[in-house]
Image (cartoon, grey):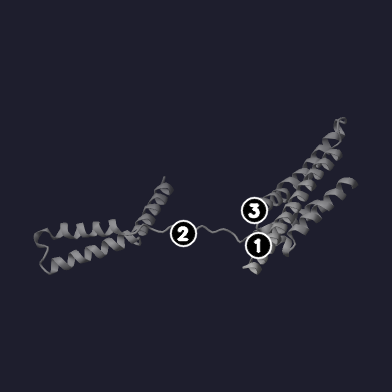
Amino acid sequence: MATSRASGGAGAGSRVLGYLESRKNLAGSAGGLVGLGLTLAGAAGAYWPAVVAGLYAAGALIAPPERADTPYFPDPAEQLGVVREDLGRLREYVAEVELPPAAEGKLSELLDLYAALLDPGWVADALATEPEAVHTLSRAIRLDVPECVDTYNRTRWWTRLTPGGESPERHLERQLSVLFEEAERVTAGLHDVEARRQQTHTTYLEGRRES
């Protein structure tokens, strides 16, 4: 209870301090000072408290609203740097896992493709302009691939106790194939974006030549 009261008091104090520093209070205070000036000059008469309060309220009402802080969004290059670090951690994780040769080869190809897309340069620059592609790549590195490998490990253990059905190795290979196809679509999409940009620039140059 004491903690609740203390936090409530702190919150109230913060709100009071925020209002004291607000534009409304500053504008209202300026109006109140005008009222005090009128009072000292004898122009307000016996109604000076109402004059001061009225001018304060008027100033607070006409004050412009508080401007909200512009939200911060990370730079695309910075975001790709974080995904690149995540890929490094993923490589360290899978290096400690024993995988069947076929799945290990497919996973190696997949991680190499991710690395090529994220490697600083014109490909990464193109990737940074495509939020959906960045999301796809980030999700695969942070969630999909680790889940595939972890599920394989757990299922392989159970299969030793209850053999039968499609092997965990086969499931893992299929999952990695799907992810590889997804990464290839991202690559093809980036290529199309660059091709459209080149065509647009060609059209611009030809139009400038004719004008």
Q: CA distance from mark 1 to mark 3?
A: 12 Å
In the rendered image, residue 18, in percent from the top left (x then y), is placed at 37, 58
Residue, x 71% and y 59% (percent of image)?
194
The answer to whether residue 58 is left or right of residue 148 is: left
Q: Earlier in the sequence, mark 1 or mark 3?
A: 1
Front position in the image: 201 or 22: 201
Q: Which residue position is annotated with label 1?
A: 77
In the rendered image, residue 22, in percent from the top left (x then y), is placed at 35, 60
* Mark linked to residue 170: none
Query: Which type of secondary structure does the marked residue at label 3 adopt?
Result: helix
Front position in the image: 53 or 118: 118
In the rendered image, residue 89, in percent from the top left (x then y), is placed at 74, 56
Residue, x 39% and y 48% (percent of image)?
5
Task: Estimate how packed mark 3 is, as few (under 14), some (14 to 19) or many (20 or more) residues with alpha carbons within 10 Å.
Answer: few
Q: Is residue 42 above or below residue 177?
A: below
The answer to whether residue 10 is left or right of residue 30 is: right
In the rendered image, residue 177, in percent from the top left (x then y), is placed at 82, 44
Q: CA distance from mark 3 to mark 2?
A: 24 Å
Which residue type does callout 3 highlight? Pro
Q: Which residue position is annotated with label 2?
A: 69
Q: Earlier in the sequence, mark 1 or mark 2?
A: 2
Question: Circles 3 and 2: CB distance less than 8 Å?
Answer: no
Q: Which residue position is annotated with label 3?
A: 131
Which residue type does callout 2 highlight? Asp
